[in-house]
Amino acid sequence: MGSAAEETLPRCHGTSTSNPWMMWSGSEGPVLLLLHGGGHSALSWAVFTAAISSNIECRVVAVDLRGHGDTHVSNPEDLSAETMAKDVGAVVEALYGENPLPVIMVGHSMGGAIAVHAATANVIPTLVGLIVIDVVEGTAMDALNSMQNFLRGRPKTFKSVENAIEWSVKSGQIRNLESARVSMGGQVKRCESGNSSPSKGNGSFCEGIQEEDEEGDKEESNHTTQPASPPQSEEGPLYTWRIDLSTTERFWEGWFRGLSMLFLSCPVPKMLLLAGVDRLDKDLTIGQMQGKFQMQVLPQCGHAVHEDAPDKVADAISTFMLRHRVVESKGDFKVFLPGC
């Protein structure tokens, strides 16, 4: 996409895991391991990475999780929490197995759930911190029944990456244009002949936001597939989502069921970053009152908090790690005072 933020995340290729990951070139301090949300990729952390790397001394590794981004594994359809947690441990082992470093895991949404599962399974013995962004068991479980409707309401294809970026911002999926310009390139791909033909129904084609269908509920039962052919717009090939999240439904409950108690049981310093305090469930509310984790609320953000407000998230996480003395500050960074 030509963004300076994207250029600061050179891609490296794993060997034992067969997974590519995006890696910041920092050479000092602990490892900040970033796990993206469902449907996203390591690029969703690009702008945040540039911000936090100016605050503290750390090495940032943003992973393309199984089935996402450019990851290649023998069974990309196995998105169980157990398998993806093992993947996370395998990546850290491949990178730092001979010279273990302190690791702070940061996960957004699905990635936050996987981070919790990885932490409780102790797949990273050198884990020193856990930060979860906008995922709470109660809210997530309540949302599962409507998730397929949400996914059907999205455009199936775009005429260009630029149109995908436009849609993401105008629809509110990402509220920061700079982030969207980097992130959406990791969420969509060119349609391949016979494999990614757009299905008829709501939002089957998007030329920016203008083509979004507002009557998707009336067409939920219509899911016939067009004959296999290379999808084309008048100007050229179409773009579609890299992963069809609707096919991952069987794993959703496993990601989120019991997540709050698992999070509270993790024996490392913990932080929960939310877009709204109303997202807390009962277990986390009690845990927060007992001081079992630090909570930070960043209002006026959407679900992709780290993309909508990358500087604020970077400041909050930097402060959290400095308070627990797992990193050193860089330059004139001043401790960010949390609102909650």
Image (tube, grey):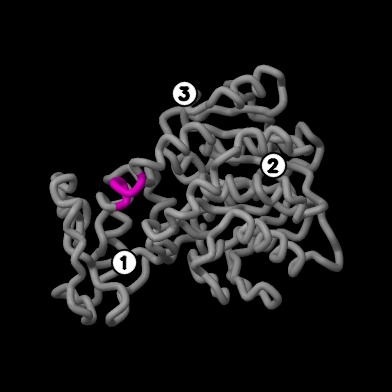
The N terminus - image quarter: bottom left
Q: CA distance from mark 3 to mark 2?
A: 21 Å
Which image quarter holds the C terminus? top right
- Picture quadrant of residue 142: top left
236 or 92, nearer to the observer: 92
Query: Which residue is more in the foreground, 187 or 265?
Result: 265
Seen in the picture, residue 148 relative to 67 is either above or below; the reply is: above
**Residue 319 seen in render:** no
Give, as a three-letter code, the residue at label 2: Leu
Query: What is the distance, in whole Å, between disc 1 and disc 2 at their CAs?
Result: 33 Å
Q: Position of residue 213 (x, y in %)?
A: 15, 50
Residue at the disc numbered 1: 240
Q: Is residue 77 left or right of residue 320?
A: left
Relative to 214, is 187 on the left or the right?
Answer: right
Q: Residue at x 86, y 68 (%)?
A: 98
Label 2 CA crowd tier, 10 Å (few <14, some 14–19, many 20+): many
Residue 89 location (% of width, % of height)? 72, 60
Q: Is residue 135 left or right of residue 328?
A: left
- Circle 2 sits on which residue? 130
Residue that badge 3 annotates:
278
Taking the spot 59% from the left edge, 54% from the top edge, the residue there is 81
What's drawn in magenta, residue-wise? 147-151
Numbered disc 1: secondary structure = strand
- The residue at the point 76 percent across, 31 percent down is 323
Image location (x, y in percent) of residue 299: 45, 28
